[in-house]
Amino acid sequence: MLSRLALCRLISPVRPVLVRAASNVPPGREILHVEEGPERDLKNFPRLKRPIYPGKVRLGFLPEEWFQMLYSKTGVTGPYLFGTGLVTYLYSKEILVTDHEFFAGICTLSLIVYAMKQFGPSLAKHLDDLVDEEEADAIKGRTNMLQMLKDDIKNEELAQWQAEAMSVLMEAKKENVALQLEAEYRKRQLTVFNEVKRRLDYQLEQVNIQRRLQQKHMSEWIVSNVLKSISPQQEKDMLAKCIADLKGLAAKA
């Protein structure tokens, strides 16, 4: 478990992504899954993988890999004979001496093993909790980042939709300006028409007034000349004749 915590501290800047392989995987036992980019060279530079559980051992301290390595060369009994021969060689050459320090070392090792058996599970659980907190922080950071990116995508889509609406609004504004220009053009045409009509009406009225004045003057001139040409005797005879005609008409009536 100490190696697990150490490896976690070593590769913590990389921030791997941890996901659950199945629903029955308990919390804190997720499988390491890293989303790699297309430019990552995993063949020449593979990513370090943090083991979740410690390797198997025999006799409490000998790794299983040593036995597997020797099986193909010495057989099943080879590792044990190799260990026995190595201890015999160390004793024969007095490299390993059995004195009071040896037994003190055995006692110390026994105390260490006892401490590991007694306090190891609780310490391992505590370290696992620390690792789980680290993993939870990594997952939470990734989740928050994904949510933030999704929000950014939604905002970008909204901005694109608003931009499309702005194009429609610009078309509507252009049509509105065109209608305003058309209305102003028609208003000015009407103004020109009214001004021309007013001037033509003025000219027509001027001609009519001139004609009426000429007719009045001509009639007055004719009447005055006619009156001037009639003598007083002719006026009396004409008046008498008119009265006689009226009396004749009254008698017939």
Image: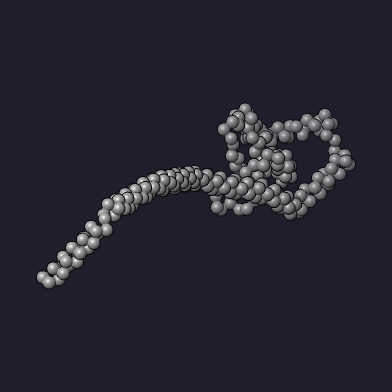
State the residue in front, 216 or 101.
Answer: 216
241 in relation to 228, above or below: below
Residue 239 can be seen in this image: yes
Picture residue at 79% right of the left edge, 51% below the top:
115
State the residue in front, 74 or 220.
Answer: 220
State the residue in front, 220 or 209.
Answer: 220
State the residue in front, 132 or 171.
Answer: 171
The colour scheme used to paint the residues is one colour
Q: Is residue 30 left or right of residue 190?
A: right
Picture residue at 83% right of the left edge, 46% below the top:
108
Residue 228 x/y as whole percent: 30, 53
Picture residue at 26% right of the left edge, 54% below the top:
230
Q: Is residue 132 left or right of residue 35?
A: right
Q: Is residue 141 left or right of residue 222?
A: right
Residue 199 x/y as whole percent: 41, 46
Total residue callouts: 0
Residue 147 x/y as whole percent: 60, 49
Q: Is residue 72 left or right of residue 247?
A: right
Residue 157 can be seen in this image: no
Q: Quarter holding the C terminus?
A: bottom left
Picture residue at 68% right of the left edge, 49% below the top:
137
176 in relation to 234, above or below: above
In the picture as drawn, the residue positioned furthest to the left comes out as 252
